[in-house]
Structures are given as structure tokens and as C-alpha cells.
Amino acid sequence: MRRDEMEKGQSLTHDEVKNAEFQSFESSTSEQNLQGEKLINSKLELLFDVMLPVSIELGRTTMLIKDILELDRGSIIELDKLASEPVDVIVNGKKIAEGEVVVIDKHFGIRITNLVAVDERLKNVKK
């Protein structure tokens, strides 16, 4: 029906109105997704018991062997980072995050403040 006919007060007949059609959701699609997630989770479970070295890098410096041999209790080593700068969280030799040092009772800990982007972490894995 044209717009000018509707403006004249003519109404639509039942034959001119079409029901809305929606795509049906199949349960098989959601079942496939669920099975895929279970498969991924089961594969990840194989890695849960793998141990990797984790270290926290406060900073770096280079020293002569002569100076290292002269180190004693109470010696101070100057690092390339300021005390307020974030420390690096390194897993298996690759930086995965940054954090800040916190003290809990008499122990040190790290509060993660920034994770390395996923694409950057994947680049590091390939190296």
C-alpha cells in the first residue's frame, strides 16, 4: 500500500501484513560450542601441573668481577630503575606483566598492575 493511500485513512488488510521471520537457534550449535569449550579446557588441564620459573626483576646493572667479589653483607648495588618504577614479572625468561612491590607482614609480594598484551606475549613465545 502506498503512503498516500495510508494518509487518506485506508487501513491495511490482513493479506498485506506479513509476519516477522526470525532465524531459529539450533541447540546443536550451542552443544558444539559447549563441546569445544570442554575440549579446550581438557587440553589446558594437561598444562596445569607444568612448573615454570617465575622471577621478579627490580632492575639491572653491570659490574666488574672485581667489584662483585668485594660485595659483602650490607653492600648497596645501584640499579637502573627508580624505587617508584614498576618491577617486571618474568615467567620462563619472558616478561608477562608489571607490578609494584608490596609488603605483607614481613614478606615481600608483587601486585600486578599491568599485563603485557596478548599479541606481544605470543611474539615472545616464538623467539
Image (spheres, grey):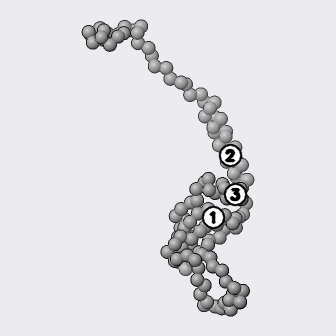
What residue type is disc 3 on? Val
Q: Is residue 94 above or below residue 106?
A: above
- The residue located at (62%, 76%) in the rendering is 60
- Label 1 or label 2, whichever lies nearer to me, is 1
> What's the CA distance linking mark 3 and mark 1?
10 Å
Q: Residue at x 71, y 59 (%)?
A: 127
- Identify the residue position indicated by label 3 in the image: 125
- State the residue position of label 1: 95
- Residue 91 image offset from top left, x and y in percent: 66, 64
Q: Quadrant of residue 3?
A: top left
Which badge, 3 or 1, comes first in the chain's sequence?
1
Indicate which disc, 1 or 2, sits on the residue closer to the N terminus: 2
Q: Quadrant of residue 26?
A: top right
Q: Position of residue 86 (x, y in %)?
A: 53, 70
Q: Is residue 3 left or right of residue 47?
A: left
User: The residue under label 2 is which amino acid type?
Assistant: Ile
Q: Quadrant of the N terminus?
A: top left
Mark 1 nearby-residue class (10 Å; few <14, some 14–19, many ≥20): some
